[in-house]
Image (cartoon, rainbow, N blue to C red):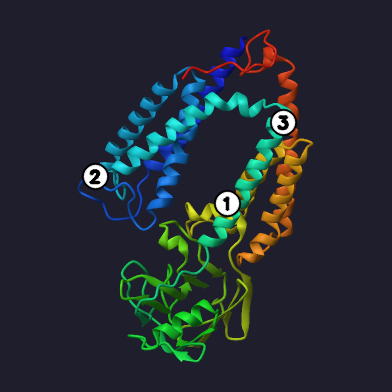
Amino acid sequence: MSDHFDLRRAGRVLLALAVAAILFATLRPSPGQDLEEWAHCLICGSRGTADVIVNVILFLPLGAAFVMAGARVRGATILAALLSLGIELTQMWIPGRDPSYGDLLFNTVGGALGAWATTVAPLLLYPGERRAARFSLAVAAAAAGVVGATGYILSPSFPATQYYGQWAANLGHLEQYDGRVLAATLGTIPIPPNRIAETDTVRSLLLGGAPLHITAIAGTPPAALAPLISIYDNHQQEIVLVGPDGDDLVYRFRTHATVLRLDQPPLRAPGALRGTAPGDTLRVAVTEDAGKFCLAVGDDASCGHGFRASEGWALLYFSDSFTPALRVLLGFLWLGMLVFPFGYWFRRGWESVTGGAVLLGALVPLPARLGLLPLSASEWAAVAGFLLLARLARQWVQRRELEPKRTPFHSPGASSEPVSIHR
């Protein structure tokens, strides 16, 4: 069995998996309003930036698979574009799916990047010692940049505009709560169900983490998130929202993710309203201290809520349907993405030692400085596991490098020079 056949066979397997994943992600019916024609925007909607990034990532494996299976980079790009075009045309007849020129463009970009990445894969898999050490420093710096960006993006962003309070409002895109709000205060400032006269003070209190207190008559647990108290500005931008989602209590506030058109997870206290019956007097409090939030109902408080460095994935795609276990798993995988490349390219030398210090700084003091929660014990275990996995992967690749005839990226009888994949 030849090496070339091994590489092509792997490419065909990856191609089948990539196409299946793409079709599953793009051709299922989705809730939402259908458009009668193609969307002409490139970055569309309130989470347009997240959609762009996801569209690129989704087609990366496809482009790589085409090249591994024998296509040139140009041909792989064209094939990715044709598949994307077929998907966009098909979406015209799928409920809740809307074709757009932006999706077509960024899917094609993803396919092209995946195809190009395959041509440089030998360099990344088999770098020399010095080059690997430099790579380790570069990826450690990149990981620190990702953590820093995550902290900034998930920090509050309250515009200096006119604010309006809303009590159990019907916002159209959310459920309406059938309870009744009696009073709401932020610090010592009342939040009325209309124009807030002291908007500047309210904005300062929000930025300072002032406690929010709500007194209400409980209603029926809603099937989905329903606002109890919300603050919007005169541009209809959501500033703060507190409300029930079934028996859960949810708190969300405007962050830089909204400004950048990314996704964002809410803060949720599961089961906080479980003992509350319709007609009961409901006393809700939201307090914050150094990025740690407490969501309280009566005397029962659920504390320690906040954002983590491991939740960077949620900026790209988040759904309330994600189970807690799935969210934890995605967090582990996100941390793995940050540390695995460093572990793979780690070598003896000042570059890797410096990179290790940078990576440690990104995972310990940096989150605290940015208002993120510290890594949990299970997250540290995941980091250690991925570093160990990276070391094992490097050892496996090095053994394959010593046996060129068994290595897909090497030609039979060659020394250690990787085979060039046609561009």
Marks 2 and 1 close (CB-CB < 8 Å):
no
* Residue at 48%, 31% in the rendered image: 114
- Mark closer to the observer (2, 3): 3
Residue 385 sits in quarter: top right
Of 39 and 145, nearer the camera is 145
Pointer 2 residue? 38
Q: Secondary structure at mark 1?
A: helix
What residue is pinned by disc 1? Answer: 146
| Quadrant of res 420 | top right
Q: Earlier in the sequence, mark 2 or mark 1?
A: 2
Which residue shows up at 39% across the image and 21% down it? Answer: 75
Q: Please name whichever residue, 324 or 189, is drawn nearer the observer in this view of the structure.
A: 189
Can you say whether 407 is above or below 55 in the image?
A: above
Could you tell me if residue 237 is visible in this image? yes
| Amino acid at pointer 3 | Arg
Q: As displayed, is residue 211 above or below residue 152?
A: below
Question: Mark 3: which secondary structure?
Answer: helix
User: Given the image, on which type of amino acid does mark 1 rest?
Assistant: Val
Q: Position of residue 96 (x, y in %)?
A: 31, 50
Mark closer to the chain start, 3 or 1:
3
**Pointer 3: residues within 10 angstroms few (<14), some, or many (20+)?**
some
**Between marks 2 and 1, how big is the CA–CA gap?**
34 Å
Residue carrying label 3: 130
